[in-house]
Image (spheres, grey):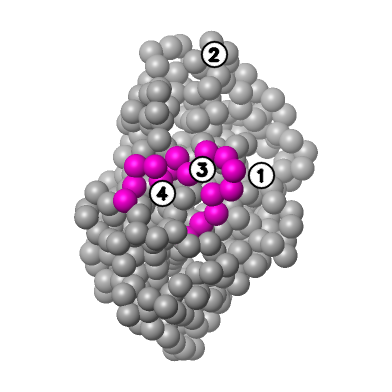
Amino acid sequence: MYVITGGAGFIGSNIAWGLNKRGLGPLVIVDRLREADKWRNLANREISQFVAPENVLSFLNAYKGDIAAVIHMGAISATTEQNVDLIIKNNFQLSSDLWDWCASYNVRFIYASSAATYGDGTCGFEDDFSCSALAALKPLNPYAWSKHLFDRRVCKIIANKEPAPPQWVGLKFFNVYGPNEYHKGSMQSVVSQVYKRVIANEAAILFRSHHPNYKDGGQLRDFIYVDDCVEIVNWLLDNSAVSGLFNFGSGKARTFASLATAVFQALGKDSQIEFINTPENIREKYQYYTEADMARLRSVGFTKPAIELEDGVRSYVLDFLHKIDPYR
């Protein structure tokens, strides 16, 4: 039995697709659907049970002899969320409880960290797992801090040789895009947002740069297609000896202008981009550059190249966004 928290969400529902595709299961989804179309992320999946997040520990205790792995993707992921108590409850405390349970019952644990933990990038983007290196990072928002807080807890546990799951892996996801993100509203990837404007024959809208070293549209991100995220989780399930905190991105920073242009190209149109001011409430906390250092993950054996940006965008646009049913 494989338990996926956040399993109805963006990355989680794609992982569920990947496990279904491999015939791994039964799958247990831990999530809230609420009243919108989030349920459609799972409409094509084979699911054994659906559990509310507040009941997950009771469920785990009831089925403790049957669970092969907990894949923990559930979180409040909006970088603009300001209810810090709620963020800590969901992103730190639940993660800690799941870690402790997996350590107690010898169950593998894979969890989502975030590249947002690197803050403005002053300390670089090397996934150094030493407690001193983690302590030097300065996250810029409550979401990033909550992820960082849990990474630091894990580091201290491992350093002190306290109980840990038999396999534990934290993945610092960079900028993920792909199908099944439609419930995220304004937090959807730039690909999805640009696509809506392109099919309406409108120019793409990107944030203007407010940094002297970056031109408008020249802000850099490490964009990674969600299929690659599915690939790494499958690989980790096949390689139980690998544990650690790892970056997960393409390893190649690309500009937002390049990303938007790839959407136009996928639809056979000339690129048209306009710029607006970055909102003041995020301007001072805005990351202008991220790029995953992938050396540590490569060193433990994961060598598959990431899907190129243009190929990933083309797949997302033509195989999903441009279809009547855009869900995986």
The residue that mark 2 highlights is 200
Q: Which contiguous range is marked in magenta? A: 30-46
The amino acid sitting under disc 4 is Ser
Quadrant in the picture for residue 47:
bottom left
Residue type at mark 3: give it: Lys
Q: Earlier in the sequence, mark 1 or mark 4?
A: 4
Mark 4 residue element: helix
Q: CA distance from mark 2 to mark 3?
A: 24 Å
Left or right for 246, reference 298: right
> Dot 2: what SS?
loop
Quarter of the picture containing the C terminus is top left
Amino acid on which the number 1 mark rests in the picture: Tyr
Q: Which residue is mark 4?
A: 13
**Residue lying at 32% horizontally and 80% vertically, measured from the top left:** 65
Mark 1 and mark 2: Cα distance apart in space: 29 Å
Given contact means CB atoms under 8 Å apart, are the residues at marks 1 and 2 in contact? no
CA distance separating discs 1 and 4 = 28 Å
Horizontal side of 233 relative to 275 (left or right) equals left
Image quarter where the N terminus lies is bottom left
Query: Which residue has dot 3 on it?
Result: 38
Q: Residue at x 49, y 81 (%)?
A: 100
Q: Earlier in the sequence, mark 1 or mark 3?
A: 3
Say which residue appears at 49% left-offset and 15% top-offset: 199
The residue depicted at 69 percent of the width and 47 percent of the height is 80
Residues at marks 1 and 3, CA–CA distance in whole angstroms: 28 Å
The residue singled out by tag 1 in the image is: 286
Q: Nearer the viewer, mark 1 or mark 4?
A: 4
Q: In x, y percent, where is residue 214?
A: 61, 34
